[in-house]
């Protein structure tokens, strides 16, 4: 089967690798344009571009999809199917209509829940116990196409969005490889999504970072896990703004006001939260400093107990 792959970040790389390993003819790869990074602002290729170059697959990085140039490239490549995984662009109808087998997407949630840009993060932020991946036919509306296949997986209570991202990338690639033969022979199902069950997973922003200690410890633990690696949850500790990278929901209860420091010593940092719950701060990074264990930070920056 001749396949055009569209993807950009690391999440998409296992899916591209799965297509190559299965022996499909990947006729080309569309990826986002290279972007400047780091202090030197040198242009950096996308992870999918790097992977495609390793396999000598032609790479195309159009800045627009609606000017006719991208469609002309696709016509020259003559793919039977377009596979999309975290490409970061909405495909116009003329591209969706071109391949004889259509366009399918690898999405990191159990649709119709968590349509949008950050489904992995929002599943954790909302305290979900389970998530998964969906292979779906693409439609003009955001992540609203008919479902072909899904696979669920539990979310570990301490799993971060970063770790879940890697797991779902591999899970999506495996499910894609299993699904493609059914697309080729016409036996793949089409299950319409239940629109009344749809939820959104919008892009993340720094507005989500500040920790509100009137919330229960579990909600704050989920916030910390869901915002790793970016934008990261933040808190003010003795007047210093800190990013928080690891926490623990403790079984203790307290009558102290939310935000009160219960413990701050070589054994660690504990704060009172809403509902009498207690959150342990395990790893943090003070503004201008390095990421470190909270106990190590406290050795050089004492914090009074309330």
Image (tube, grey):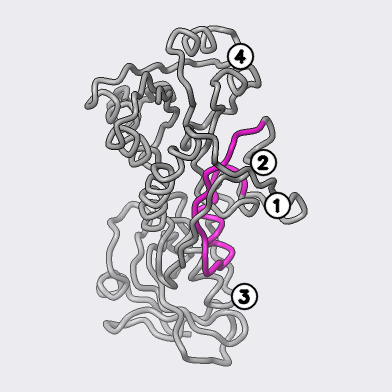
Please give the label number shown on residue 214. Answer: 3
Relative height, residue 288 to residue 20 (above, below): below
Whether tag 4 and tag 1 are in contact, CB under 8 A, the answer is no
Badge 2 crowding class, 10 Å Cα cut-off, few under 14, some 14 to 19, many 20 or more, is: many
CA gap between label 2 and label 1 equals 9 Å
Relative height, residue 216 to residue 198 (above, below): below
Q: Secondary structure at mark 4?
A: loop
Q: Earlier in the sequence, mark 4 or mark 3?
A: 4
Relative height, residue 152 to residue 277 (above, below): above
Please give the label number shown on residue 144. Answer: 2
Badge 4 crowding class, 10 Å Cα cut-off, few under 14, some 14 to 19, many 20 or more, is: some
Whether tag 2 and tag 3 are in contact, CB under 8 A, the answer is no
Residue 3, by quadrant, is top left
Q: Earlier in the sequence, mark 4 or mark 1?
A: 4
Q: Secondary structure at mark 3?
A: loop
Residue 203, by quadrant, is top right
Report the number of numbered marks: 4
Where is residue 60? Give x, y as percent.
40, 16
Magenta span: 115-139
Q: Secondary structure at mark 2?
A: loop
Badge 3 crowding class, 10 Å Cα cut-off, few under 14, some 14 to 19, many 20 or more, is: some
């Amino acid at each position: 089967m001749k396949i055009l792959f569209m993807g950009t970040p690391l999440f998409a790389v296992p899916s591209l690798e799965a297509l190559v390993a299965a022996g499909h003819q990947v006729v080309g790869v569309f990826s986002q344009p290279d972007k400047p990074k780091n202090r030197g602002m040198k242009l950096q290729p996308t992870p999918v571009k790097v992977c495609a170059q390793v396999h000598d697959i032609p790479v195309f990085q159009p800045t627009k999809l609606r000017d006719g140039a991208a469609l002309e490239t696709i016509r020259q490549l003559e793919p039977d199917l377009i596979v999309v995984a975290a490409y970061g662009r909405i495909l116009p109808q003329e591209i969706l209509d071109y391949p004889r087998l259509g366009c399918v997407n690898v999405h990191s949630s159990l649709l119709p829940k968590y349509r949008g840009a950050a489904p992995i993060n929002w599943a954790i932020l909302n305290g979900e116990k389970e998530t998964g991946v969906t292979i779906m036919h693409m439609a003009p509306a955001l992540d609203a196409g008919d479902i072909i296949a899904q696979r669920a997986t539990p979310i570990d209570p301490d799993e971060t969005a970063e770790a879940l991202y890697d797991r779902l990338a591999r899970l999506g690639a495996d499910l894609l490889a299993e699904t493609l033969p059914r697309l080729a022979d016409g036996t793949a199902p089409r299950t319409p999504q239940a629109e009344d069950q749809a939820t959104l997973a919008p892009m993340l922003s720094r507005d989500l970072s500040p920790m509100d200690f009137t919330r229960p410890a579990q909600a704050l633990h989920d916030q910390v896990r869901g915002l790793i690696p970016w934008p990261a949850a933040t808190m003010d500790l003795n007047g210093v703004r800190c990013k928080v990278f690891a926490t623990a929901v403790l079984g203790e209860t307290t009558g102290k006001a939310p935000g009160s420091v219960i413990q701050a010593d070589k054994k660690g940092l504990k704060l009172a939260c809403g509902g009498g719950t207690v959150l342990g701060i395990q790893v943090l990074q003070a503004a201008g400093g390095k990421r470190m264990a909270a106990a190590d930070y406290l050795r050089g920056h004492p914090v009074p107990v309330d």
